[in-house]
Image: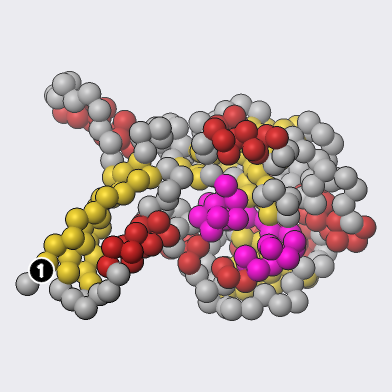
Amino acid sequence: MILVKIYVTLKDSVVDVQGEAIKDATHTMGYPNVSEVRMGKYFELKFDDNAEHLEQDVDEICDGLLANPNIESYRYEIAEEA
Amino acid sequence: MKFAVIVFPGSNCDMDLYYAVSKGIGQEADLVSYKEESLDGYDGILIPGGFSYGDYLRSGAIASHAPIIKEVIRLANEGKPVLGICNGFQILTEIGLLPGTLTNNRQNCFICKQVELVVENNKTIFTNKYNLNEKIIIPIAHGEGRYYCDEATLRELNENNQVIFRYGQNINGSVEEIAGITNKQGNVLGMMPHPERAIESILGSDDGLKLFKSMLETQKNGVHI
C-alpha cells in the first residue's frame, strides 16, 4: 500500500478569514504572540502498490478536485505503508 | 421554452426556480437529477442554490464532477442559456465554465438579507428587460459569496463587459463588488443573489422576474444587442 499525504493551503494572495478568526481566538485564550494563522486541509489517499503514474494521478486529483488552483496550492508526500 | 432545473443532493432552491419558471413566466420546467446523463430537448439550464454535497471540500467542488455536468458543459458550448444561482454559481466556477472562485465572506459569517444590485450590462440574454445601471432589490443568502479572481481575469471581465451585476455596497468583500458574471460568449450567467426569490411583490421584491422574462424574450425574438 502506498500512502500519499496531501496538504492544501490558500495562496498568500487570498485573505484567510477562517485563519483570522482562529488567530483572534488564540489571543482570547491568552496567546497574544500568535501573529498569523493560515488554515488548510489535509488528505490521506491510499493507492494499491501497483499504481502506475502515481505522481501524475495525484497531480490530476489535486488540480481537478482537492484544490482549487484559483485560490489554493498543494504539496504532498509519498510514503510506503506496511 | 423548456427549462431543466438540476437537482443535486443538498440543493434547496430547486423548487423556487421551478416556481419562477412555471408560475413567474408560465414556461415548462423539469426537475432533473444530477445522476441523469442527457439534457436533450431543453432550451435552458438552471442550477439552483443550496448546499450540494453539504459544501464538503469546497462549495460546488463535488457537484462539479456529477454525471449531469458533461451535459451542462455540452449545452453551454452549444450556446444555450445556463444560469447558476448561489451554489449554482459556485458550481459553474468549479466546472470552469466561469472564471474565478467564490470563497468565504470577508466577515466570515453567513449573510441573509435584501441587497441592492446595479445592472452593469443589459445587453445580455439574461438582462435585456432591465435598464442599464438600474438598481434592483434581490435577496442574498450565502456564507461563501466573496468573488475572487486574479488581476488579469478581472481586467478581462471588465473589458468584455462580463460583469453583469455589482452590489450597491460591498457586502461580502468581493473584488470590485462583483455579484454576477457571464462567460465570454454571454450565455452562462453565475450570480450569488437570488432572483428566483424576488418574483412576486409579496416576497418583498419582484425585481428578479425580469431576469426570467429576459431569457424568454431572447428565445422568442433573439437578443437585441
Q: Height in image: A9 above or below A14? A: below
Q: Position of residue B43 (x, y in %)?
A: 77, 68
Find out whether residue B165 is within the magenta segment: no
Identified at 38% across, 52% down, the residue is A67
Q: Nearer the viewer, residue B59 or A78?
A: A78
The residue labelled by disc 1 is: A81
Residue range highlighted in magenta: B72-99
Quarter assignment of residue A53: bottom left
Residue B60 percent across, percent down from the top left: 48, 56
Residue density around tag 1, few if under 14, some if 14–19, many if 20 or more, within 10 Å: few
Judge left or right: residue B201 versus residue B176: right
User: Where does the N terminus of chain A fall, quadrant-wise?
Assistant: bottom left
Residue B39 lies left or right of residue A36; in this view the side is: right
Magenta-colored stretch includes residue B92 = yes
**From this viewpoint, which residue is outermost toward the top?**
A32
Q: Quadrant of the C terminus of chain A?
A: bottom left
Question: Would residue B94 appear left or right of B154 to someone viewing this image?
Answer: left
Pinpoint residue B67: horizontal percent, then vertical percent: 52, 74
Q: x%, y% of residue A56? A: 33, 64
- For this orientation, the residue located farthest to the left is A82
Q: Nearer the viewer, residue B152 or B115?
A: B152
In this rendered view, identify the residue nearer to me: A14 or B14.
A14
Residue in view at x 45 percent, y 32 percent:
B106
Is residue B199 visible to the viewer in this orientation of the structure? no
The amino acid marked with disc number 1 is Glu
Foreground of the two, B121 or B149: B149
Residue lying farthest to the front in this orientation: A53
Name the secondary structure under disc 1: loop
